[in-house]
Image (cartoon, rainbow, N blue to C red):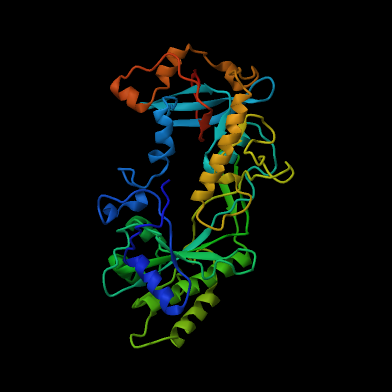
């Protein structure tokens, strides 16, 4: 991922966080960044939406690129995993999926010596449930990293969408209970549409003024390591449902972080500080004030009193975790410490759903580390599983029109092959495992063996 703190350049918003923290005596530091230096100094203003050139070194520019160079990678765009299939011994050996092409769709069965599910903390548990897994921890213990954004309006332009986001962080309130639970304060990167959705509603005039001041705004996001838990399930209509209630401790941690973020913005030179509350008016910073500002503390008192009432404060979920958590026993979690499901040998989970608790930082590094750990278990499993087995006949796979390899591969070809007419090999090289995402649909079936 090319993580490094060397050569990190701060945009105006991150400089504001560092400046405010320095004046207040709060800790603040440079964050390691992934990827290479961009060709444009302003990053094109689209960092939050991803870079087409791949400089961010996401999976498409690192792990997937490495896999593609082996010649064993087959990507099925528009493909939704429906169910993990098992052989007669109960081991995972295939995935039934729906492949959409040109306004139509048909079912395929992708067979392999193992199955790795990486659909994220919201979709992975739903796929496991559809596949018949019964562990009670699947879909539970959902953590969300609840987050609230406030912003300061500065006299000079900030243009916070330009340059890399989250190049700085303050840990001033990251451990509020002595057990590592609290919040971090960062500089986010929002597209104007996201910004519009997060602005509090205090009337049309204030909303228009706040949105018009987009280029002069410096936002700070407070992100909580939450102890509260939720769950995800499918209702009687087959639609995913999420239930999550923020506990009083997490709310207190978030409000404490927001107070500190407001002080940082005022100390950094903001003319106004805007909360995410509909019922708390913006604070106008006293131009001649130095050091502590009694009027700011009084405003923060009103913010504390307002609390976090439903539908009156803009909150978001920064990351989703823990719905198939790892544990040493099936009574405590859905998957083993190796990532393998307790109920189904050969079925591995490698995403943030495996986190035993909410992470104390943004989960990218942790997720990458877990994926590496699980991959070692997958390799050992593959070494012990030389053959691809047939799914059990009592599963939906019995309806499949088992196709020969050339036919199946042609129908499951990548979008690039479909566009260019590139020939798909009749027999694919054996890959290490089948990677499954999730969703739903159906029609006629084909088979791809990996």
> Which residue: 54% across, 16% down?
400
Q: Nearer the viewer, residue 382 or 231?
A: 382
Q: Tell me the quarter of the picture where residue 305 sits.
A: bottom right
> Can residue 280 be seen?
yes
Q: What is the x, y in percent for residue 449?
A: 51, 19
Q: Which residue lies furthest to the front in this view?
A: 6
Q: What is the x, y in percent for residue 425?
A: 40, 16
User: Does 34 sit above or below residue 108?
Assistant: below
User: Does 170 sit above or below residue 448?
Assistant: below
**For this view, does 67 lie left or right of residue 208?**
right
Question: Number of numbered discs present?
Answer: 0
Q: Which residue lies furthest to the top in this view?
A: 404
Q: What is the x, y in percent for residue 66?
A: 42, 34
Q: Nearer the viewer, residue 411 or 385?
A: 385
Q: Tell me the quarter of the picture where residue 251 sits.
A: bottom right
> Which residue: 45% across, 79% down?
24
């Amino acid at each position: 991922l090319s993580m490094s703190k060397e050569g990190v350049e701060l945009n105006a918003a991150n400089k504001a966080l560092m400046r405010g923290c320095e004046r207040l005596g709060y800790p603040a530091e440079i964050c390691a960044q992934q990827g290479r230096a961009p060709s444009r100094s302003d990053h094109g203003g689209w960092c939050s939406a991803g870079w087409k050139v791949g400089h961010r070194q996401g999976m498409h520019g690192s792990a997937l690129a490495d896999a593609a160079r082996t010649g064993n990678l087959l990507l099925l765009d528009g493909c939704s995993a429906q169910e993990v299939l098992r052989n007669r011994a109960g081991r995972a050996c295939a995935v039934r999926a729906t492949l959409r092409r040109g306004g139509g769709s048909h079912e395929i069965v992708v067979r392999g010596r193992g199955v790795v599910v990486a659909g994220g903390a919201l979709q992975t548990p739903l796929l496991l449930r559809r596949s018949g897994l019964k562990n009670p921890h699947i879909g539970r213990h959902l953590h969300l990293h609840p987050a609230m954004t406030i912003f300061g309006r500065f006299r000079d332009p900030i243009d916070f969408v330009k340059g890399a986001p989250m190049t700085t962080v303050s840990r001033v309130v990251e451990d509020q209970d002595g057990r590592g639970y609290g919040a971090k304060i960062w500089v986010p990167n929002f597209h104007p549409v996201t910004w519009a959705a997060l602005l509090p509603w205090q009337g049309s005039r204030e909303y228009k003024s706040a949105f018009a001041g987009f280029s002069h705004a410096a936002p700070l996001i407070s992100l909580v390591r939450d102890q509260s838990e939720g769950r995800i399930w499918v209702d009687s209509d087959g639609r995913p449902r999420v239930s999550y209630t923020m506990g009083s401790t997490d709310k207190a941690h978030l409000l404490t972080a927001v107070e500190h973020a407001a002080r940082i913005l005022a100390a950094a030179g903001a003319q106004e500080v805007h909360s995410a509350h509909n019922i708390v008016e913006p604070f106008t910073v006293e131009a001649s004030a130095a050091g502590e500002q009694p009027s700011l503390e009084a405003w923060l008192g009103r913010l504390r009193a307002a609390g976090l009432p439903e539908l009156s404060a803009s909150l978001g979920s920064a990351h989703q975790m823990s719905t198939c958590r790892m544990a040493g026993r099936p009574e405590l979690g859905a998957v083993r410490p190796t990532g393998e499901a307790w109920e189904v040998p050969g079925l591995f989970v490698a995403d943030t759903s495996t986190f035993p608790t909410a992470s104390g930082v943004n989960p990218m590094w942790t997720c990458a580390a877990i994926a590496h750990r699980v991959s070692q278990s997958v390799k050992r499993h593959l070494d012990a599983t030389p053959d691809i087995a047939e799914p059990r006949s009592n599963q939906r796979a019995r309806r499949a029109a088992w196709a020969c390899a050339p036919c199946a591969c042609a129908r499951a070809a990548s979008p690039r092959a479909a566009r260019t007419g590139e020939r798909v090999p009749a027999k694919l090289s054996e890959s290490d495992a089948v990677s499954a995402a999730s969703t739903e649909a159906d029609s006629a079936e084909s088979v791809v063996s990996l």
